[in-house]
Image: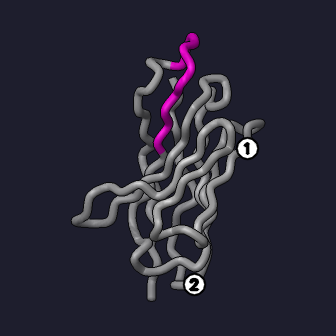
Amino acid sequence: QVQPVESGGGSVQAGGSLRLSCAAFRYTYCNTDMNWYRQAPGKEREFVTGIIRDGSTTYADSVKGRFTISQDNAKNTVYLQMNSLKPEDTAMYYCNAIPRASKLFCGPPGRDYWGQGTQVTVSS
């Protein structure tokens, strides 16, 4: 299975930067789409950004121009570089992995796998 594990959260002042990492074993082997979601207290989980195996990316309007998603295939890791952070970016950030390949050890194609989340707090 492709189980994502996040790291890199923390506290930062507004205008600062953080980089989150999401390591997913067999990420490349399983042809996995990777996404970042976030959930603030009292709000629903929302899509932040995603990347598919050919490198195509998608961003929520609220983070365009500030956040960048990238991948390191050799490390089976996806990164979320967050710049110009705002207090409204404060949330628990979750990595989501969706394997697309029908291969041994990948789990059912199209199934969602979620990490445990990493907290990002931006103070004003």
Left or right placement of residue 92 versus residue 71 in this view: left
- Give the residue number, with chain letter if any, for mark 1: 72
Residue 15 image point, x, y percent: 57, 84
Q: How many marks?
A: 2
Amino acid type assigned to the residue bearing label 1 in the image: Asp
- Quadrant in the rendering for residue 47: bottom left
Asked if residue 109 is positioned above or below residue 67 in the image, the reply reads above
**Residue 84 — which label?**
none
Q: Main secondary structure of the magenta part?
A: loop
Residue 98 image point, x, y percent: 48, 33
Between the residue at mark 1 and the residue at mark 2, the CA separation in whole angstroms equals 26 Å
- Quadrant in the rendering for residue 19: bottom right
Asked if residue 47 is positioned above or below residue 86 in the image, the reply reads above
Residue at (39% x, 65% y) in the render: 91
Residue 79 image point, x, y percent: 64, 53
Q: Which residues are magenta?
A: 96-106
- Give the residue number, with chain letter if any, for mark 2: 15
Is 99 covered by the magenta stretch?
yes
Q: Residue furthest right?
A: 74
Residue at (42% x, 80% y) in the render: 87
Residue 68 image point, x, y percent: 63, 61
Quarter of the C terminus within the rendering: bottom left
Dot 1 crowding, Cα within 10 Å, few <14, some 14–19, many 20+: few
Dot 2 crowding, Cα within 10 Å, few <14, some 14–19, many 20+: some
Q: Are marks 1 and 2 in contact (CB under 8 Å)?
A: no
Residue at (46% x, 56% y) in the render: 118
Q: Residue furthest left?
A: 42
Asked if residue 96 is positioned above or below residue 112 in the image, the reply reads below
Say which of 52 and 19 sits in front: 52
Residue at (53% x, 62% y) in the render: 9
Amino acid type assigned to the residue bearing label 2 in the image: Gly
